Amino acid sequence: MAMSNRPIYMDNQATTPVDPRVLEAMLPYFGERFVNAASRNHQFGWDAEEAVDNARKQVAALINAHPKEIVFTSGATESDNLALKGVAEMYGQKGDHIITCVTEHKAIIDSAKHLEKQGVRVTFLPVERNGLIDLDDLERAITDKTILISIMTANNEVGVVQDIREIGRIARERGVLFHTDAVQAVGKIPFDVQAMNVDIASLSAHKMYGPKGVGALYVRRRNPRVLLTPIIDGGGHERGMRSGTLNVPGIVGFGRAAELSMNELEDESRRLGALRDRLLARLREKLDEIYINGDMERRIPGNLNISFAYVEGESLLMGIDDVAVSSGSACTSASLEPSYVLKALGVGEDLAHTSIRFGLGRFNTEDEVDYVADKVTGTVQRLRELSPLYEMVKEGIDLSTVNWTAD
Ligand SMILES: *Cc1c(COP(=O)(O)O)cnc(C)c1O
């Protein structure tokens, strides 16, 4: 049996390794195929243009779009900014209201807050305990001034998948544009802009085994035709929506990554789902008092987000320091707040601090899952042996009835 390499990378919702087949496709474009895809006067330029066109087709095919509907960007942060700010400015005459949700990525939340300062009204829909928005809330929030609904397809922390098809149906029925940050879903679960009535969608290459610094915005061309005011002005590249010399190697890699994801989606999602279930089963076999954050059914296959009660978050992470995962705890991130996503799900501070996001990906193996499960269970058991609270719970004491003051 092959031993796995340490540290083990299990943080694939943060970023994914570049697939070697993607790297191979990109390399010539750093070397002899260096030319600007906008150079129309010579063979070199035509080659680069052809490579970009091919990538555009590959990315479009993955989401059932037309190649002309793909606008290449520097990543999904830019795509999210362009979607919200571009719609707000272009459709400002029509209305001044946007609807989004509290568990969105910061690229959406902060773009929406930026627009609020400019006088746009923003509704941040809450989520239920399972991480899903209530579709009745959504319907009630729509007014005749609403110009955009932006709801993410899959959440980056808890992996929960919103009912995009139904949201798309509602948006279409009410004549409101629908944007979705689909970064965590595209290439992982079926995603189809036609079937789901999506008008605008954000994608990122580095979340699907492509390179960092390249992404796309899908912008619908007909029924309805969506127009966006650019946030970057210049030479008029990308149908005027995003100026700037194209990142040809990055785009070629993105295209190849999209092609691979499309070909392998079914097998890969089945394999990842099985690995995820194996990890969960192994944790549950040896540990009680563990809590899954977010809906377990409506979830991308590679995500498991669990809180381990009665341990200290920092000690837990230190105990598994040869495993790369993310935590909902403050001590691992730049901000001091525990995860705002878990908070929005109603997860208390204690459980938020002991949450771990296991992000399984294409290159994780069964051996790695077993190693991680053993490492986590061993660490949690050891920490709980030191926990007076856990001991009291095991003795059947209801902690909510305990009078903690010493007298
Ligand atoms: C990673 C991520 C982004 C940002 O993408 P970049 O390409 O890194 O800018 C946006 N939304 C979600 C849901 C993400 O997971």
Image (cartoon, helix red, strand yellow):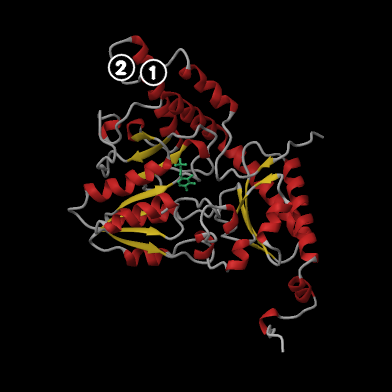
Q: Are marks 1 and 2 in contact (CB under 8 Å)?
A: yes
Asked which quadrant contains residue 250, the reply is top left
Q: Residue at x 27, y 32 (%)?
A: 239
Of 241 and 260, nearer the camera is 241
Measuring from the top left, give residue 86's x and y in whole percent. 28, 45
- Camera-nearest residue between 256 and 190: 256
Q: Residue at x 61, y 45 (%)?
A: 11
Q: Position of residue 167 (x, y in %)?
A: 39, 56
Q: Is mark 2 within 8 Å of ligand 1?
A: no
Picture coordinates of residue 396, whole percent (x, y): 77, 79
Q: Position of residue 117 (x, y in %)?
A: 28, 58
Side of 66 relative to 385 (left or right): left
Is any part of residue 199 visible from this angle? no
Residue picked out by circle 2: 39
Which of the marked residues, 1 or 2, is nearer the chain's N terminus?
2
Q: Amino acid at mark 1?
A: Ala
| 224 relative position to 359: left or right | left
Q: Nearer the viewer, residue 147 or 401?
A: 401
Where the N terminus falls, by quadrant?
top right
Q: Mark 1: few, some, or many residues within 10 Å (few <14, many ≥20)?
A: many
- Secondary structure beneath disc 2? loop
The residue that disc 1 covers is: 48
Amino acid type of disc 2?
Ser
The image quadrant of residue 151 is bottom left
Instruction: Give above or below for 248 relative to 90.
Output: above
Identity of the residue drawn at 74% across and 56% down: 283
